[in-house]
Amino acid sequence: MLFSCWHPNRFILVMYALALALAVQTNSHAAETLAAPQQLAGKTLAEWGKNLTDGDLRARLVAVRTLPGFGAGADEALLQACQDKHAAVRFWALTALGDRAAGNRTTFQELLKDPSLAVRTAAAYAHCRLKITPQAFELLLTGLQHPSRGLPIFAADWLGKIGSPLATAALSSGAKHKDYHIRNACLEALQTIERAEQTP
């Protein structure tokens, strides 16, 4: 897993946030295809934003995974969360902004120097969704080769969403990985890039 190197309690917090976020179905795609809701899990955008700034780590993790369901209205709060003191919050905020191709390139550029490799890679994804640069793109390719399982899977998915054929060689190599999770993620990314190239 991406954060398996962390203390077990921190890992549990991340998984808890994921479970709650999935339970309320707050993915960015849904936010784009449906009108932004007034509330999610009984709270408004403002209330989730307050949790993100004032809550403890668990509350902030749940908030950062829930806010994308509000669509563009949550972008400002997510951008602020990119500066959170905890790497997991920064990671999910960057991931959400990257999924929406939203945010601030200057902020993302600064976070390419973050102490956390996972955060640097997520910042590279968010940056490349707005503009591909050699530094950011290389970080994604580095993430694809990480010895863990989680980061390469994220990197493959992100490279697919970015859609640049520059990633084809690295993804083709990853499609032969001994870990079938990574292998399948690379294959799916290649298919996504191929479909994008075929779209008029």
Image (cartoon, grey):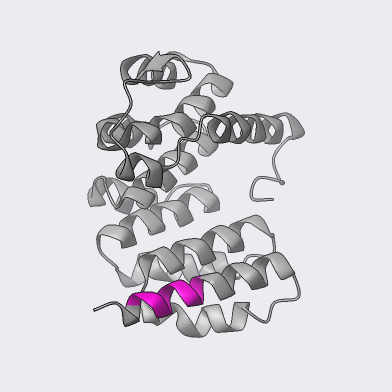
Q: Nearer the viewer, residue 21 or 3?
A: 21
Q: Quadrant of residue 186?
A: bottom right
Q: Which residue occupies the extreme front position in the image?
A: 34
Q: Residue at x 67, y 32 (%)?
A: 10
The image shows residue 90, relative to residue 138, as above or below, that is above
Q: Which residues are magenta?
A: 189-196
Rendered location of residue 39, percent (x, y) = 37, 19
Note whether residue 80 is visible: yes
Residue 17 covered by magenta stretch: no
- In the picture, which quadrant includes the C terminus? bottom left
Q: How many marks?
A: 0
Rendered location of residue 7, percent (x, y) = 73, 35
Q: Residue at x 62, y 33 (%)?
A: 19
Residue 195 covered by magenta stretch: yes
Q: Is residue 109 left or right of residue 40?
A: left
Rendered location of residue 35, percent (x, y) = 28, 34
The image shows residue 58, relative to residue 156, as above or below, that is above
The image shows residue 173, relative to residue 89, as above or below, that is below
